[in-house]
Image (cartoon, rainbow, N blue to C red):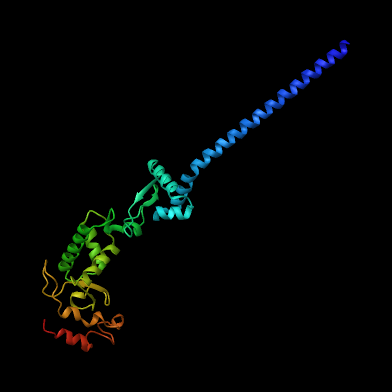
């Protein structure tokens, strides 16, 4: 009898222990599921920001328009807008001006600087054409040409550097743009060196710039004989040399130009 009772008690204890263990395992499983769900919910909440940020970073120094973000991410507009505001607050992105479409909100990752295609380069400041800087450069180029009588692009650029005419950096390509605009505006004329007279120190055929005859500072150029110098349009200028077969000495067009009364 005692053995039967003891066996029954042991069976009950074992059964209770099995139940407790099962309950513990079920509880742990539920906790793990809840934790996973919480992490997934948290990840889902951060996903739009990560997607938007990665897209903006992928555009590097070109940035991206907010409407293109919506199209490329397939996220609702309000979600994209919210993500952008959050990223701006965190200072991981910034808004930049696109001179080609100033009305559009353009964004870029904070570690990049806008490309010249966006900003317009040196000629633009905060999306606006720097007319004051351009005017200073044009006036300076005109004074240099008047001083040197005949000047090449390289000579003008070197004059800028040696005399530190501007505090802002001014590259040779930028000066070339200024000179081209001045030629189009008839403020100066573009000719090619004949390696004679005023051009003696400049290799023949080299593009040069000079003021029109009789032009003074503050006046528009008076287009005269210099504007029609034959060397400037001669297709053989590269073969022309002082003592060659093709030479200014034997050129009837050059002789007529020299005899022109101006």
Q: Nearer the viewer, residue 217 or 49?
A: 49
Which residue is rendered at x = 21% and y = 89% of the image? Answer: 252
Q: Position of residue 190 (x, y in %)?
A: 22, 74
Residue 261 location, x and y as percent?
11, 84
Q: Position of residue 165 (x, y in %)?
A: 20, 57
Question: Image quadrant of residue 180?
Answer: bottom left
Picture residue at 14% right of the left edge, 85% below the top: 260
Residue 170 in picture, x, y percent from top left: 26, 59
Q: Quadrant of the C terminus?
A: bottom left
Left or right of 53: which side holds 154?
left
User: 147 or 138: nearer the eye?
Assistant: 138
Give the residue displayed 56% in from the left and 39% down from the top.
Answer: 40
User: 66 above or below 39?
Assistant: below
Q: Is residue 178 left or right of residue 44?
A: left
Residue pictured at 25% horizontal, 54% vertical = 168
Q: Quadrant of the N terminus?
A: top right
Question: Is 260 placed above or below 25 here?
Answer: below
Q: Is residue 139 above or below residue 49?
A: below
User: Residue 227's quadrant in the figure?
Assistant: bottom left
* In the depicted structure, whether residue 57 falls above or below residue 147: above
Give the tally of numbered discs: 0
> Seen from this angle, which residue lies furthest top?
2
Q: Is residue 197 left or right of residue 240?
A: left
Closer-to-camera residue (244/216): 216
Judge from the rendering whether residue 143 lies leftward or rightward of residue 88; answer left or right.
left
């Amino acid at each position: 009898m005692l053995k039967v009772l003891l066996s029954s008690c042991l069976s009950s204890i074992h059964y209770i222990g099995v139940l407790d263990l099962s309950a513990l395992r079920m509880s742990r499983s539920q906790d793990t599921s809840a934790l996973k769900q919480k992490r997934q919910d948290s990840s889902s909440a951060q996903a739009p920001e990560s997607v938007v940020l990665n897209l903006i970073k992928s555009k590097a120094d070109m940035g991206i328009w907010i409407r293109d973000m919506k199209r490329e991410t397939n996220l609702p507009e309000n979600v994209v807008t919210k993500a952008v505001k959050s990223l701006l607050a965190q200072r991981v992105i910034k808004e930049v001006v696109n001179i080609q479409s100033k009305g559009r909100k353009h964004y870029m990752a904070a570690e990049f600087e806008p490309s010249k295609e966006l900003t317009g380069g040196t000629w633009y400041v905060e999306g606006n054409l720097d007319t004051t800087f351009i005017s200073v450069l044009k006036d300076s180029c005109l004074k240099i040409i008047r001083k040197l009588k005949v000047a090449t692009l390289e000579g003008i650029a070197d004059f800028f550097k040696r005399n530190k005419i501007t505090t802002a950096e001014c590259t040779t390509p930028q000066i070339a743009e200024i000179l081209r605009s001045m030629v189009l505006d008839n403020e100066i004329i573009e000719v090619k060196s004949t390696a004679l007279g005023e051009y003696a120190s400049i290799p023949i055929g080299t593009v040069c710039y000079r003021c029109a005859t009789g032009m003074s500072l503050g006046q528009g150029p008076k287009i005269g004989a210099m504007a029609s110098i034959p060397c400037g349009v001669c297709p053989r200028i590269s073969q022309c040399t002082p003592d060659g077969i093709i030479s200014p000495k034997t050129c009837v067009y050059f002789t007529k130009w020299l005899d022109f009364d101006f």
